[in-house]
Image: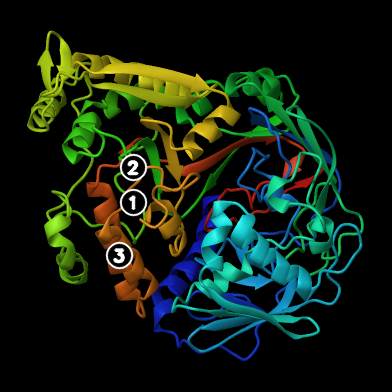
Amino acid sequence: MSPDFLRPLRPVAAGIACIFASSFALADSSHGIAMYGDPALPPDFVSLPYANPDAPKGGKVVFGNTGGFNSLNPFLQKGTSPWQLRFWTHESLMGRSWDEPFTLYGLLAESVETAPDRSWVEFTLREETRFSDGSPVTVDDVIWSYETLGTEGHLRYRGLWGKIDSIEQTGPHSVRITFNEPDRELALIAGLRPILQKSQWDGKDFADGQLQDVPVGSGPYVVDGYEAGRYVNLRRNPDYWGADIPFRRGTMNLDEMRIEFYGDATVLFEAFKAGELSAVREFNADKWDNQYGFPAIQRGDVIKTEIPHGKPSGMTGFVMNTRKAPFDDWRVREALTLAFNFEFINDTITGSAQPRITSYFSGSDLAMQPGPATGRVEELLQPFADDLLPGTLEGYGPPTGDGSARNRTNIRKATKLLAEAGWTIQDGVLRNQNGEAFKMTVLLQQGDTDMATAVEIYARALERLGIQVLTEQVDNAQYTGRTAELDFDITPFRRAMSLSPGNEQRLYWGSENADAPGTRNLMGVASPAVDGMIDAMLASESREDFVAATRALDRVLTAGRYVIPIWSFDIGRIAHVSTLKFPDTLPIYGDGPQYMPEVWWYEE
């Protein structure tokens, strides 16, 4: 598998090296659009490079989710819907290739055109596009979708609307969007907005949609049946309009996909072992090595597949809510990180098989470099020097322990930092100058056994510091509501990163929505330096400036001590029934919602 994975990496790596050297100008009309330079695939490409255009259609698969759902509309801020729906039932004007840093190809739109400075973008719809009920996808649907999602939809869709100066029909099948600020990425972000059917919501309040109000989409699958909180069944639309367009060829091959819901991950895994599910993703390397020897695997009915990737590590760990004291003090956050005995916890949970994340972009060329900031990175950071936390300019990395259960050296360092922050042991309890005890709650989802084990070990260390720890395990719906309302002290956290970071960074840690309910900026960071580095990334006109700005952002975030980093997911691990097949060539981004089951197929 490795040679097949590395083969697509070579041209992509070469493309990354020269993307910023290309001219900003694009052809008047194109089949695709890249963040910088030209799309890698020609106008007459047959299929995506990691799809099998000859893959057979057919078969039924069953996947498992934990928790439940009370909505089938993934575009609303309200409610909890199965995360898969927005990938399977709805489409955007353009579709993303996961074998390039950030390139889109025509999906609902047959072509795209931009101004040389990308101050506007124009999409031309394919005449054959249809919603699942057979009605055509119109420019009116497009304009309505952008406005409705931008004003009433989930927060992930609202940021773009504020950057649109105008959106207007320019022809029978074309729509032009003009932006109100310079940002080269906006043309691509616009191409990825889901398109909904306007007429379905005539006389209805979109934001108050009920469970039965399943939004009509143009995607390959439709919801075929459901029982609240128990299952959702989807079938491939036999009249799907886009089955033969290049972007879709060899994808969405399964006839029926069912999502079953389980109380927790342990019950889900037992269901998989019993043959009730077709595939599971495993994120624990030790469990992968030691608990996947059950009879179905021994017989060859279930196969273990590893999917490598070339993307950054992203950040996984325990995020601290800096809106609350004492987590607003970096010394407290550093002390809590020191007390987290990573080496011992990692050995206990993963058998030390998964390395620690060292920064938000670790494992890639975009990651902060060891030691002091130099060159362009230092230049970008210097205007904010007075406000930067210790280690940002000098160099910072997560603390390391000695691997022992007691972790004495780091506990002593943590005690000293807490004292500097005004917290001292009084009668065995850590208290501040007002005599208030240091109490904190760790919010967990039910069934998250790895995180529960980590917290159990962590709590013992915190108790030695005099910190009182309460663990709350709640179901998925409660967890979603609590985190949306920012009602937590510390909670598990995951943010994936791409090879072309951009406007999503504002959602993750920009100050504008730091305190808004439902924000993705869970730590609540509101830093001029963070905002400045994101601005520098988006304004970059050369590869050198882009990499420098990203590395500078990585420094500010990592030295901010907002998240206690844990282990990385350096490869994808999928256990699946032997009748599920996938192409030999793998995308640079590896596994993800757009890979399995999108390019897989069923074959006896």
Label 3–label 2 contact, CB within 8 A:
no
Label 1–label 2 contact, CB within 8 A:
yes
Q: Amino acid at mark 3?
A: Met
- Asked whether, in this view, residue 233 is left or right of residue 573, the answer is right
Quadrant hosting residue 121: bottom right
- Per the image, label 1 sits on a secondary structure element best described as loop
Residue that numbered label 2 is attached to: 357
Mark 1 → mark 2, Cα distance in angstroms: 7 Å
From this viewpoint, which residue is outermost toward the front? 203
User: For the residue carrying disc 2, how many other residues have a C-alpha within 10 Å: few (<14), some (14-19), or many (20+)?
Assistant: many
x 76%, y 59%: residue = 250
Measuring from the top left, give residue 495's x and y in whole percent.
44, 46
- Asked whether, in this view, residue 383 is left or right of residue 55, the answer is left
x 49%, y 72%: residue = 185
Q: Quadrant of the C terminus?
A: top right
Quadrant hosting residue 238: bottom right
Name the residue nearer the viewer: 314 or 331: 331
Measuring from the top left, give residue 395's x and y in whole percent.
16, 52
Above or below — where is 115 with respect to 542?
Answer: below
Residue that numbered label 1 is attached to: 362
Mark 3 → mark 1, Cα distance in angstroms: 17 Å
Colour mapping = rainbow
Q: Amino acid at mark 1?
A: Ser
Name the residue nearer the viewer: 348 or 11: 348
- Per the image, label 2 sits on a secondary structure element best described as loop
Q: Mark 3 or mark 1, which has the lower sequence index?
A: 1
Name the residue nearer the viewer: 266 or 581: 266
Q: Which dot marks residue 533?
A: 3
x 62%, y 48%: residue = 593
Q: Is residue 42 visible?
A: no
Q: Is residue 541 visible?
A: yes
